[in-house]
């Protein structure tokens, strides 16, 4: 039994020796893992920012369209006439004369 125990001990040490001989490569793989995780977190953060900016842009577009339609409606001739009634101004029904 003592011989079997020595063999397993030698095998264990061979595995550790293999581990130590490949230590730079293992460190490189660990570094790549950390870079991969950091890249994934960065991409998720940027995706959330893009979604927030797109939502803000959509809100700004809605506000722009609302103001634009309100301005178009309020600048129609009928609305201008309604506003001028309070100011005691009238719209002439006849066409102005051209001077030659």
Image (spheres, grey):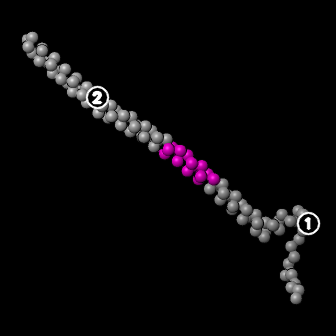
- Pointer 2 or 1: first along the chain: 2
Please state the horizontal and vertical placement of residue 48, each as a whole percent of the image: 51, 43
- In the image, residue 68 sits, relative to residue 97, either above or below, namely above
Q: Return the residue nearer the eye: 10 or 38.
A: 10
In the figure, is residue 22 to the left or right of 55?
Answer: left
Say which quadrant the C terminus sits in: bottom right
Q: Marks 2 and 1: which is nearer the front?
A: 2
Please state the horizontal and vertical placement of residue 74, each as a whole percent of the image: 76, 63
In the picture of the structure, the residue carrying the numbered disc 1 is 88
Q: Return the residue nearer the eye: 48 or 79.
A: 48
- Please tell me whether residue 42 belongs to the stretch shown in magenta: no
Instruction: Kindly indicate the quadrant of the structure image that contains residue 40.
Output: top left
Give the total number of marks visible in the rendering. 2
Q: Residue at x 52, y 47 (%)?
A: 50
Counting other residues with Cα less than 10 Å from the Cα at mark 2, is it few (<14), some (14-19), or many (20 or more)?
few
Counting other residues with Cα less than 10 Å from the Cα at mark 1, is it few (<14), some (14-19), or many (20 or more)?
few
- In the image, residue 13 sits, relative to residue 66, either above or below, namely above
Q: Return the residue nearer the eye: 38 or 19.
A: 19
- In the image, residue 93 sits, relative to residue 72, either above or below, namely below
Q: Residue at x 30, y 31 (%)?
A: 24
Numbered range of the magenta stretch: 46-60
In the picture of the structure, the residue carrying the numbered disc 2 is 23
Say which quadrant the N terminus sits in: top left
Instruction: Kindly indicate the quadrant of the structure image that contains residue 28.
Output: top left
Please state the horizontal and vertical placement of residue 78, each as a whole percent of the image: 78, 69
In the figure, is residue 55 to the left or right of 100?
Answer: left
Q: Please tell me whether mark 2 sits on a helix, a strand or a loop.
A: helix
Marker disc for residue 77: none
Furthest-right residue in view? 88
- In the image, residue 5 sits, relative to residue 34, either above or below, namely above
Q: Residue at x 60, y 49 (%)?
A: 56
Report how far apart the C-alphas of labels 2 and 1 lie in the structure. Answer: 93 Å
């Amino acid at each position: 039994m003592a011989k079997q125990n020595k063999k397993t001990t030698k095998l264990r040490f061979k595995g550790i020796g293999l581990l130590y001989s490949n230590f730079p490569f293992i460190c490189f793989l660990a570094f790549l893992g950390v870079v991969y995780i950091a890249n994934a977190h960065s991409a998720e953060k940027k995706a959330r920012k893009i979604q927030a900016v797109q939502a803000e842009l959509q809100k700004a577009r809605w506000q722009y369209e609302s103001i634009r339609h309100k301005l178009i409606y309020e600048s129609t001739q009928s609305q201008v006439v309604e506003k001028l009634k309070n100011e005691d101004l009238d719209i002439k029904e006849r066409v102005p004369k051209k001077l030659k």
